[in-house]
Amino acid sequence: MYSGKPLQMYTSYEPVLGLKLWALGRSLGAPRYQNDVMHLILNQCEEDEDHGITLESVKLAYQMTSGASLLRELTADLMVVAKPFQNLKKNGPKWVEWQKLLRTCPDLPNDMAIAAASGKDWTKTRPWDAEHRSSYMEKVMSLRVKWKTQIEERSAKMQKAEGAGTPSVKAEIEEKHLRRMGPKTPRVVPEPALFIS
């Protein structure tokens, strides 16, 4: 049963589940859910010795996303902070695995360069610190605004299709529904008057 909170124990059985839950929220168009999961991911990055940067997590983050994804941005920032290559022996087994990953995820080196040049001072702060958390959060629009926008767009399309005549019945009903659900004003019930004669 859904309790209104994402799984808080996900890291105990699969460290990359948070990434998968974030991607699920994206595919469902649920930015609030994505943000809840992102907070959990950031909390886990703070607790983990490797800051959540493993071959598997980086590969998964890049496979599940494209372009200017906030998950990719976080991954690149974490790569700059964690510096997973720093203590690896060149041509050693781990170094070779990371080199393969860089070839598999060709955007990663560029994203890391952008993250390093972003002007964020990672010597004093980390991606999971309060001052940076908001930069990894999706923009959330209220459902009322979203619905109103969708109804207005649909109404405009219908009017255009009908030759810019009168609004369709469906559009009028939707508009009335939005107005009815507007801010409610309290009803004032007058006190009964006592008439003494």
Image (cartoon, helix red, strand yellow):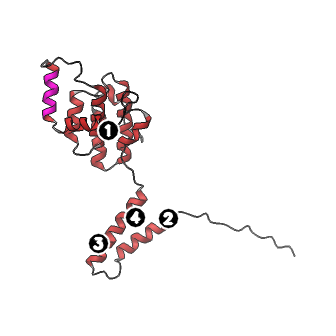
- Mark 4 / mark 1, whichever is N-terminal: 1
| Amino acid type at image mark 1 | Ser
Judging by the rendered image, the residue that carries numbered circle 3 is 157
Residue drawn at 34 percent across, 77 percent down: 168
**Within 10 angstroms of label 1, few (less than 14), some, or many (20 or more) residues?**
few
Verify whether residue 102 appears in magenta: yes
**Along the line of sight, which residue is nearer the eye, 101 or 166?**
101
Label 1 to label 3, Cα distance in Å?
Answer: 42 Å
State which mark lies toward you, 4 or 1: 1
Residue drawn at 24 percent across, 27 percent down: 54
- Mark 3 / mark 2, whichever is N-terminal: 3
Residue drawn at 40 percent across, 28 percent down: 124
Q: Which residues are magenta?
A: 95-103
| Amino acid type at image mark 2 | Gly
**Along the line of sight, which residue is nearer the eye, 19 or 185?**
19
Evaluate if marks 3 and 4 touch, with contact meaning CB atoms under 8 Å apart.
no
Label 2 to label 1, Cα distance in Å?
Answer: 43 Å
Residue 110, percent from left and from top: 21, 38
Residue 68, percent from left and from top: 26, 45
**Along the line of sight, which residue is nearer the eye, 106 or 150?**
106
Judging by the rendered image, the residue that carries numbered circle 2 is 182
